[in-house]
Image: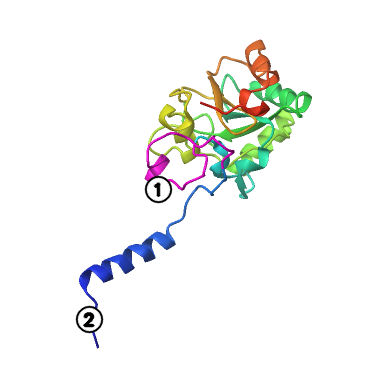
Amino acid sequence: MKILPAFLLCVGTALAVGCSKTNDVVPEVAPAGAMAQISPTGVDGQKLTPYVDYSSVYRYNVIDINGQRVNLGRYRGRKILIVNTASQCGYTPQYTELQTLSTQYASRVVVLGFPSNDFGGQEPGTDGQISNFCTGTYNVTFPLFSRVAVVGTAAIPLYRFLGNQAYNGVTNDRPTWNFCKYLIDETGHVVRFYPSAVTPLSATILNDILTPSPTAVGQVRN
């Protein structure tokens, strides 16, 4: 029996490990000219694939509050308001305005709620408890996702992307408390970050939602 050279064994091992590794992103073909001009490796150090738009949230998969895997590309064509939520916060009544925003402006924007216990331990419940609270108290019908970390080393990849300008091209702002918000345009790119005190139906957010983004009318994002 022949013994394989050591370097061939190393290559085979590396390939096997690479094939078994799970990834939180899925390839997404970028619009012409819209490929991100960022470092050779993206969030979490994954090797970048040509023609994938790494400045778009559409490459991310997240888990909804019912345990189902969701790719954010399903919301293509509308703006997205991403909010880190909590059930026991002074800002919790913002759920009312978030629900109003999601119903009155459904053709323009989709609200996505990401419950998090990162700030003040104000979201201690299970996904089931959070879902029951949101639907029972605030009649929430917009998509809610499984409770996650949004800051620090435990933050999910989506939030590491949202809070790093080197990847999203716009902002280094990260959530500082519950109910911080990121607006994403119709092609999946970050538009703006809003702190907790900026309410969902504020003139600032409504104006940003109702104003078409340059990328939505065929212009290439710089």
Q: Which SS does the magenta portion mostly show?
A: loop
- The one of 69 and 12 positioned closer to us in this rendering: 12
Q: Which residues are magenta?
A: 30-54
Residue drawn 64% across and 37% down? 144
Residue drawn 67% across and 11% down? 203
> Does 78 appear above or below 210?
below
* Residue 92 image position (x, y, % from top left): 61, 23
For disc 2, the marked residue is: 3
* Residue 72 image position (x, y, % from top left): 61, 41
Discs 2, 1 touching: Cβ within 8 Å: no
Image quadrant for the N terminus?
bottom left
Q: For residue 150, say whether it is visible.
A: no
Q: Residue furthest top?
A: 203
- The one of 100 and 93 positioned closer to us in this rendering: 100
Q: Is residue 35 magenta?
A: yes
For disc 1, the marked residue is: 47
Q: For residue 169, say whether it is visible.
A: yes
* Residue 119 image position (x, y, % from top left): 47, 27
Q: Dot 2: what SS?
A: loop
Q: Is residue 25 magenta?
A: no
